[in-house]
Amino acid sequence: MEHFMNVEQYQFIKKQAKKIASAYSNTKDEGVIQALQALVMESINEKIVELDEESLAILKPIVTIQTKEQLEDFIRKIKVYVTPFDKLTEKELKKLFPKDKKLKVPDLKNIDWTEISYLSWLDSGTNRKYIVYRNDNGIKSIRGIFSQSSKKGICAICNQHQTVGMFMSSKKGRAVGTYVKRGNYICVDSTVCNENLSDFKRLIDFIETINE
Ligand SMILES: [Zn+2]
């Protein structure tokens, strides 16, 4: 079986599938539905370039999704074609944060690696939030102090209106003994954030801005 989607593309397609299903429940106007169907197929072709005939045939039923059951069924069927986030071990995670001698890592067995573009967890004892992702050069990681809140706002990673908290990272400044702090608002719930993240570049931009 060919994995023709990465997680970010899969999340994008799920969003499109939900759009179609909600259109069917909101309108009886054939013209509106047809226009949306065309738009969705076009956006999928833009998102996953060089989609071959076989893969396209797997995704095409998206335009016929009308019910919640059909939506779930479609998502289940396409999920097997997703290249998951390349699993990390506890040992690998500990190596990424050598300064944290007592690093608490999440329960890796409970993670659905086909649903995440990045791995993140919060140590509620220290309020440290950890973010790990992969790019072409390997594993990247960042940690920061996270101020939880119940406030709603736009997340700097997924760009959606969600419950957000301030992620603040500090690093040594140019002058000895100085620190530069940089932060931004991101989702409190990284599972939700990953589901919303259909543009991986936003995550990279967020990390680069923090690390600048
Ligand atoms: Zn988010």
Image: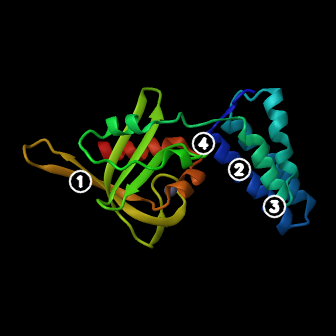
Q: Which residue is mark 3?
A: 68
- Residue at mark 1 to residue at mark 4: CA–CA distance: 29 Å
Mark 2 is on which residue type?
A: Lys
Question: How far apart are the two marked residues, 3 and 4, measured between alpha carbons?
Answer: 22 Å
- Name the residue beneath numbered marker 1: 181
Residue 14, numbered circle: 2
Is label 1 in contact with label 4 (beta carbons under 8 Å)?
no
Q: SS class of the residue under badge 2? A: helix
Give the secondary structure at mark 3. helix
Three-letter code, disc 4: Glu
Mark 4 crowd level (few <14, some 14–19, many ≥20, 10 Å Cα): many
* Mark positioned earlier in the residue sequence (3 or 4): 4
Direction from residue 158 to residue 82 in the image, left or right: right
Residue kind at label 1, given as amino acid type: Lys
Q: Is residue 187 left or right of residue 6?
A: left
Circle nearer the N terminus (2, 1): 2
In this rendering, the answer to whether 22 lies above or below 82 is below
What's the image's color scheme? rainbow
Of pointers 3 and 1, the one earlier in the residue sequence: 3
Query: Dot 1 lies on which element?
Result: strand
Label 1, residues with CA under 10 Å away: few <14, some 14-19, many ≥20: some
Horizontal relation, residue 138 to residue 10: left or right = left
